[in-house]
Structures are given as C-alpha cells and as structure tokens.
Image (cartoon, coloured by chain):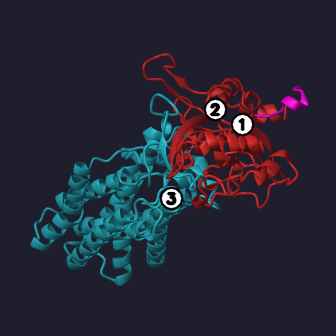
Chain colours: A red, B cyan
Amino acid sequence: MTCLPDKTDKKLGLLIDLNICVGCHACAVNCKEWNTGGITGPMEDIKPYGDDPSGVWYNRIHSYEFKKEKEADRTVYFPKSCLHCDDAPCVTVCPTGASLKRSEDGIVLVNPDVCIGCKLCSWACPYGAREYDTSAGVMQKCTLCIDKIYDENIPQERRVPACVSTCPAGARHFGDFADPESNVSKRAAEFDGRELFPQMETKPVNKYLPPRKREKHEDRRLTPKVSTVKDALLKWAKLDFTG
Amino acid sequence: MHPALSVIIFTTFSGMGYGLFIWLCGNILNGTAPDNMSIVGGTILSILLVGTGLLSSTLHLGHPERAWRAFSQWRSSWLSREGVMSILTFVPMVFICGQTYIDMGFQKLIEPMAIAGIIGSVLTIFTTSMIYASLKSIPAWHNIWVVIGYQIYALSSGGVAYIMFSDWQQYLYVILLLIVALALKIITWISIDKHRGKYKREDALGLPDFGKAKPFEPAHSQKNYLQREMGYDLDPQRRTLMRWIALGFGFIFPALLLYIGLPITPVITLICLIGMMAERWLFFAEAEHVVRLYYDRESV
C-alpha cells in the first residue's frame, strides 16, 4: 500500500559525517558489490568496461568546493543515497503499490515484481535517490542492505549496511533515529545533524553532519600573520601556543 | 525533464478527446446537440483520442503488461486515480455512442449519462494535471496554472474538434475559449520564468551557511539515468521557436481559421493538435527538476 504509515516503530537510517568523508568511493563500490548479489540484484551494468559505461548505483559520491568570504575554501565530499524519508513522496505517487515504506523500521523499498516502470517515483524524489534499471524495466533504490542488517547468519556487529561497514574513515554510521539514545541520534544532536533540502518537506531520516567550524589556527592559511621575533619570544615566555 | 513522445501524446490526445466529449455532453444537456450521426461520430473520435492517449502512456512503461496494477493505489496516487477515472469515463462515452447509434430503449438515460460524462471528463483531466502539479520537486509544475491549464487546453482543443461535428454551431465560443487559452499559456510562461531560481544548490546540500558551492569532481564519468531523464537542456532559440509554434498552431491559427470560416475543420483540428503537442513538449522540456542542483545547476 502506498499510503505512508502514520508512524514507524524504528527509523533506521544513516548518519554521514561530511567532516570525515574523504571521497574515496569505497561505500559506493561496496554498495554495488553487496547489492548486485543481494535480493535486489543484479544491479544493471551497461558496457562497464567501454567508453560509455552506465548503470544503476544506489549511492553516488559527489564533491563540492565551498567558497565563503574571509574563509579558506573547503572541499566537501558528499555521498548521496536514499534518505528513507518519513514523508516519502516517491511512495505516495506509486500507482501500483510497488513503492512502500515499512512500518516496522521505516525502510523505503521497491517491490520489483509489482513495479510497472512508470518512473514517476524518480520524478517525485528531490534527491535523485532512485535509478531506473533499463534492462529489468523496474525502479531500483537503496534498501539499507535489508538482506544484510537482518541476516542472523552474520555476526551481530557486522549487521550494518555495506556502505557503513566498508567506510575506511568512519564517516558513516547506521542506527535508529527514533531512539534518542541511539548512537546516530546522539551524534546528530551533538554535531548539528542536518537534513538535506528541508524546503522539500520530505522529513528525511538520514542526517548529515556538516564540516566542523574552523579552529583559529586554520584561518591563518588565508591571512598569515607575520609575528615579530618579540611576539614569538613573549609567547614562548608565557608558554602559550595558541593562535 | 526529458520530453518523451509517449507522454506528450498521452496528455494531448486524451485532453482533446475529453474536451470534445465535454462539448458533446454539454450540448446534449442544452438541447442543442447536433444530429445523431454527428453525436456518434463525435463520441467515436473522443474514444479513439482518449484510447490512443492511454495506450501511448503505457508505451512509456517498463512493464506495460502490468499496467492493470496501476488501478490499485487510488488512495494515495494521482496517477492511479487518473487510471481509475479514465476507465470510469469510458462508460458514458460508450453508452452515449451506442444508445445514439442504435436506440436500445435507454434514451431516458442519455441526459444523466451526459452529466456523468462531463463530471468524469473534468475529473480525469484534473487527475492528469495533478500527476504533475503534485510534484514539489519540479517547481514549473507545482502550481495552480498547470491544473487550470490542463482543463482549459482540453476544452479549447476539444472545442476545435467539436466544430467538425456541430456544423459550426457555437464556433464563436470556441474562438473565445482559444483566446482565453492563449492568454493563460502566456501567463503560465511568465509565471514559471519569474519563479526560476527559487531553490539553491546549498539548500539541496543542507549546507546554506558554508558559502557558495560548486561541483568539484563529478560523481560519475558518464551521464546517469537521473541526468538523462531530468537533465534536459533546452536551447533558448529552440524554446522561442517552440513557444511560437505552440501559440500559433495551438491557439492563434485555429482561432483565425475558424473566424474566417474555412470549411476545412479536420485540418484546423490537426493544426490545433500539433500546437498542443508543441505546448506539451515545452511543458516537459522547460520543467527543471531540483535534482539538477546536485549536478549542473546553481539554482532551479
């Protein structure tokens, strides 16, 4: 049923720390690796080794340069996948019931046996989280590795989405945002967890931690202060090493 | 948005079909209906136009054989509601056509069926427009002009088709409607052009307080589905040309030809339909999806 549940028992999702992400694409690669052999696989790959490869990815790593006056430029690596929104517009537009949001954990899924491939859900998503599989004629999207996080044959500590378990920098966290005491809720509260595109009123479950505010010493790169020998000596005298 | 021919045909053909049927039903209720054979001809053309439109829309699907499933989610989905309404509206269409062709003794039901036909057609056009107008992710569609426009263009193009069957009766009303439709189209374009740039890339990234963002390394080397489907780049010159074709063929030429009274109503109808297809092509080509903010647009 494509009506959204009034409330989901859990809100499973990802917390992505933009301050830590190094843009290595390992999460996207492991996502494809896991899911192409998982319940939603195979993931489409057209001419993967040719000049014009294309195909479905549930996770793609963008990167941006931010310029702000009186600050040094920053590079922000920006992994983007389905945000498993509470008010998911992709679910309600679906005419067949293929798109659904689970009431138990809030995961948004596509049932490939019912999808007619009208692509309307991908139009409704502001984030570009859904990609169409031209070979199978159905829509594809991130499942939060539903076939991994609930697999009892896997040790408990490894039951996290493939993107989370592979991240070498520890920039990705998985947990229940409905529980204020969960790892992700606490981290999101402490480090200013953000929603993507709040103007779209989709209430995304996934949150992003913004790059941290710059410490004082970082600003020196933009406007290096020439300190005199006297100043330096005074600082040493005070044993003050800040600034 | 990528202007797919199947969807352009879907909305223009079915719009004209429902518009024509509304004109027929209105005149049946008004007591000014043309002769029986014209009613039969008119309803058959309505059915053909709507049927072609609906069939064409299934060509857009990855699994046309599963299209029947689209009738199930009418509680949440405008596309599903559109499917349900379009099928229901076939009932008065087929009834009026059949009963007028061979009197099956249900003549009393003609008027209630004509009322049902008008309500069904208006609701079907409304549900079609809401498929697009409900999408917040496409600002050019998420406005009232789309909802009003779909009704008016269906009535104006259907009115032009109705002239073929009504022996030029009420042609002045059709001309009036074409002028209204023309004005509405221009207002719509002014409105969507003025409202461009409402959403910024920094909003999409959730980082409005970090200065100006510019893409650095692309997320992938080749265009992906999102860019192919939603990254249509409309050349400004082509836009101007298509806007003139839409206005000229869709509204101005049909109005002028009807005013002159040239006895080539099928040709006028065809001109109008071509104009509406140009209008609908622009409806897609001009509509920018906010997902472009993650790619090549600073604002949408």
Q: Is residue A211 visible?
A: no
**Residue B36 appears at what percent x and percent y?**
31, 70
**Residue B72 appears at what percent x and percent y?**
64, 54
Q: Mark 1 points at which residue?
A: A171
Q: Mark 3 lies on which chain?
A: B
Q: Is residue B80 visible?
A: yes
What type is the residue that disc 3 sits on?
Answer: Ile
- Residues indicated by labels 1 and 3 sit on the same polypeptide chain: no
Q: Name the residue under label 3.
A: B131
Going by the image, does B195 lie left or right of B82? left
Q: Which residue lies furthest to the front in this view?
A: A230
What residue lies at 39% left-to-right and 81% top-to-bottom? Answer: B29
Q: Which chain carries label 2?
A: A
Quadrant in the picture for the C terminus of chain A: top right
Q: What stretch is highlighted in magenta?
A: A153-161
Place residue B193 in its image quadrant: bottom left
Question: Foreground residue, B172 or A178?
Answer: A178
Predominant secondary structure, magenta span = loop
Going by the image, does B181 lie left or right of A45? left
Place residue B265 in its image quadrant: bottom left
User: Helix, strand, or loop for circle 1?
Assistant: loop
Q: Mark 2 points at which residue?
A: A22
Q: Earlier in the sequence, mark 1 or mark 2?
A: 2
